[in-house]
Image (cartoon, rainbow, N blue to C red):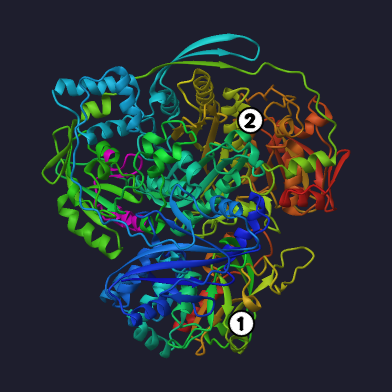
Amino acid sequence: MTVRIDVTAPDDPRGAHVVANAPLVGVTALTGCRVTRVHHVDGDVSAEQIAALCEQVLVDPVVDSSVVGGVTPAEGRVVEVALMPGATDPDARELERAARNLGLPDIRVVTARRYDLLGELSDADVATVTHRLLANDTIEIWTEGELPAEFAGAAEADVRVDLVPLEDLSDDELLRLSHDRVLSLDLTEMRAIQAHFAAERRHPRDAELETLAQTWSEHCVHKTFRAKIDLTHTAADGTVTYSHHDGLLQALRAVTDELDPPWLRSAFVDDAGIVAFDDEFDIAFKVETHNHPSALEPFGGANTGVGGVVRDVIGVSARPIACTDVLCFGPADLPDARLPAGVLHPRRIRDGVVGGIGDYGNKLGLPTVNGAVLYDDGYTANPLVYCGALGILPHGSHPTEPQVGDRVVSLGGRVGRDGIHGATFSSAGMDASTVDHVGSAVQIGDPITEKGLIEVIERARDARLYHAITDCGAGGFSSSIGEMGEDLGVEVDLSVVPLKYPGLQPWEIWLSEAQERIVIAVPSAKLGELEALCDAWDVEVTDLGTFTDTKRLVVRYGATPVVDLPMGFLHEGIPRREMQAVWVDSPPKEIVPPAIDASHILRLLAHPNVASKEDIVRRYDHEVRGGTVVRPYVGPEADGPADAAVLKPLGTSGTKAVVLSNGICPAVGRHDPFAMALLAMDEAVRNLVAVGGDPDQVAVLDNFCWGDPTKSDRLGSLVRAVQGCTEGARRYGMPFISGKDSLFNEFDGEAIPGTLLISALGLVPDLHCAIDSAGMAVGDDIWFVGRHQAALGGSLASEEFGLGATDVPEPLVDPLPRYRAVHAAIASDLVTAAHDCSDGGLAVALSEMAIAARQGVAIEVPTDGVDAATALINEAPGRLLLSARAADREAVSAILGEHGRRIGAVTGDGFVSLGAVVVLLDDAVLAFTKGVVS
Amino acid sequence: MSRPPVLIPHASGTNRDDEAAQAIRLAGGEPTIAHVNELRSGTVRIADYAAILLPGGFSYGDALGAGGRLALELRTWFAEELATAASAGKPMLGICNGFQVLVKAGLLPGPMGETRSVTLTENAEGRFECRWVTLSVEPACRSGWLGAIAGTTMRCPIAHGEGRLAVADGASAERLENGLVAFRYLADGARPTSRKPVAAAGAYPANPNGSVNDIAGICDEGGTIVGLMPHPEDHVLDWQRPSGPEGGLGLPLFEAFVAGAR
């Protein structure tokens, strides 16, 4: 028997949210929206037992009303939306568990949402509201009127292993096979596979082909970053240079090996990079991207993006302690007419992504403390979602060597058909039909299951219950188990894998990227202890098989062979690519900067890339774990932008704290990707130094999001950016410790701007000396560090005022002495506030400090030989504003030396005075916090 | 002086238990974090502890409404033990999700078993929000152990999506005003123009979630059980405070709690 239970809270704010957003999608007639939570309960339960479920669990007597056994009478046009059968549905699962708590017979539950839409609505209005605000076809089903309950998983187990003959296929047929099965392999690779099986005198099994495609995917093996590349580079002055690159990844690693600082623990070899924190603890850091999934299903894509990067940190035996996120979207006010078919509106993508990040990070109990949000036309069809995670582990506690005879043990979530082909899907471009082909690659996360993994792995690590660990990400078991067993050999049985529902074929179980799973190598003698631990923490644990000494990957389903591949071919058999790259830097162009007055500065402050992101940031918990020293927004009104996050990890002693910052400047990369890399690194460092970080112990992560690298111009800018990274690592003495590339960010042949995110991890020696941009007091001196440059290419002002500048600022050649001086002043407790000059230049930076502190300031603008306007708006690297007590003037001057100049003072009046240009502080606050220019 | 043992139950999805333990330790108590499974199996016994602190987080993912699933487990598995603890005068404190659990279990304002007239539901703004708030510890609150800090002001963060305290009717609100209101949101005193905190009077963001009468926390009729939405455990050390007025530490709350357990 199936009973429907409708629960409605009359003032559910989600209804108001729909009404508020309707005009933005062109529906003005919607006057009200009532939201109802629908539960279909299937089982042998009595009316009394249903009543008990309602009273004890479902219905809040203070705010809810309910209808049991029927359907809520329609109040307007009714739309019902449900997750596709089989998708993760925590409400359904918890209601099933609640029934068990109450001693009821076992029930099965599916849930839905019902919307009663009020107002004089046309059919077109209802369709628009449904498609744009209520439902996403990628993961949901919906109907106007009542949606019948659909329970998943009536299917029988399907133990079918198909053979895929390759022997007689022509080149065209090989390529068609690659495309039809979403293998994303090119002809050379398909031929290598064909040759391998021809030599073995047999047909490949479906799972073998899929395993090779996953392991050889761009996502997993970084084909482009390992390729041999010939670059033809034309500089801005017309000089042409030819160069050969024997692996971009190898180049990044080489510079890390060359720098090899004593505090470096592990770089590039594992799921995350690791550096020393103090004598007792190390810190792990990783930043991932989840772009393609977020374009299709923003909430789920970002949600699982956070889940994935947190598992990377768990995968080096660390306890996750913080998250970061950097997001790039199309313009929030993009007119519908400019939205390509098959693309979600940037506003919807943003809301979904932000919701997904908050949901996962908040529920894991991790503070999301550092990030950025950029808006640009180039990201409309391909949003970028960079998710980072920080973790802590006792020094030397991360085991990395599985032993022959160890058990292959899987922990965490169950396997479903969700998330199949994620790795290969992300290794191809997208178009309007992408949703139809790869809907299965998108899923919704389950943070509570992942939280269980965090608790169990920390305890298992401390009890030394495992010899090796890796997270189950792209490629699922095929990739994680295949990698762990690379040096030994492994044999597993898929028939014991716990499934969300029956009916999966063996290759689907093997490939599924179902979330929240970790694989560990457990000595047989420790298995009992591990199982008891998992039991206590409600974490599912499964013994899948054993590590062998055969150097083969052997997968069975019961007695049926599924995969039998030599590890050598799987991991080394991929042919190395040879690629051609071309890049032409923008030639210089004469421009005339406008005369800058207060209204220009207000426009820059109100620009979406500068204006406050509080609406987003406050949806993330940035306080949990009690270690946040410098938060995203600072000052008496907690609305001034901070430069970087400072965290004191819970459980550590002493005064050391961690600092996290980032740098990103894709607008520069359009003209000169080499400079972009150096300028992004500079931005990350000066942000880090501005809060008290030590410039002599900084590790960085690279994240490259680019277009299709098989097109020579995309590859050309990528190679130039990597050259900038290696050069920057040397100039700043900062090793790269981990990285990630997400290529093929193209829609209908249009690529995103090549976008490099630099994430920096450093230390504040004494958290009591950490400062923010708001700490200045009336009478303090204002100091300026660094020098202006005339180049305006890639600057916010060039974009906002339509200058068309192409000439980008010169990167710093010897940056460290300057940053050491600033750090020394801050560490000596001489600096009351600091803020870096970046987007919008000195004018925006000084205004932001004044807003943060709610104090007037007055300076004489140093010109460094540039014109008055350019001095206010240029974005040359290496510049900071500091405030310091007037009484400390001599001491500050002595420490800053040639690097700093005293340019003004904190006045305490209501003005931001930049020489002759005067901005009302109240106007600046309004522009920055509300995006309103009065 | 002895350190009273304080039980911090953990359910799947609980977090801020580590910070709660740190606060208890700093306040002179001896915290033990125990999974609900351990309480159920009897490995850890509620009766062995002098006080109980239900921490924040998202127990069971807050599926079906924040705290509801853990509340059901408390009612079905531990009702008797909790009643015994309350009648023995052992202090009980619920923070954020822990507060939601105590309310939904019917322990706050109580008594358990009656139809609930108070709840915690979706923030008026309709979304999760994290920001620092200022709180009064209400002088008229009848909680005995909280009396030690009555009349003081605390600053600490909120981080919740379902923190709006709502009541069934006017009579329920009136009942709370009769000594059961433990904490109220105050308009922040950080501005140079308004150094002294004043009533939030329902205005966002000082009252961050639209709670009726600015109520941030309540106690039960007996005064031993106290709950609040904000997180004083995230402000037990001076450096945890953002720039702004000095003081307002949450530590005295935990000291009062531990003292009440002696």
Residue at the image position 43 percent from the left and 43 percent from the top = A276
Circle 1 Cα neighbour tier, 10 Å, few/some/many (<14 / 14–19 / ≥20): many
Magenta stretch: give its range: A452-478
Q: Is residue A221 visible?
A: yes
Q: Position of residue A849 (x, y in %)?
A: 73, 47
Quadrant in the picture for residue A898: top right
Query: Which is more toward the observer, B154 or A215?
Result: A215
Query: Which is more toward the observer, B167 or A64?
Result: A64
Residue projecting furthest to the front = A123
Q: Position of residue A563 (x, y in %)?
A: 19, 36
- Whether A471 is among the magenta residues is yes
Circle 2 Cα neighbour tier, 10 Å, few/some/many (<14 / 14–19 / ≥20): many
- Whether A112 is among the magenta residues is no
User: What is the CA distance from the residue labelled 2 to the residue labelled 1?
Assistant: 56 Å
Q: The N terminus of chain B lies in which quarter of the figure? A: bottom left
- Chain label for disc 2: A
Q: Amino acid at mark 2?
A: Ala
- Chain label for disc 1: B
Give the residue at mark 1.
Answer: B150
Establish if A716 lies above or below A70.
above
Residue at the image position 61 percent from the left and 60 percent from the top = A17
Residue at the image position 35 percent from the left and 86 percent from the top = B80
Establish if A834 lies above or below A63.
above
For the residues labelled 2 and 1, say whether their Cβ atoms are less than 8 Å apart.
Answer: no
Q: Position of residue B100 (x, y in %)?
A: 49, 73
User: In what element is the residue under mark 1?
Assistant: loop
Is residue B134 found left or right of A100 in the rendered image? Answer: right
Give the residue at mark 2.
Answer: A667
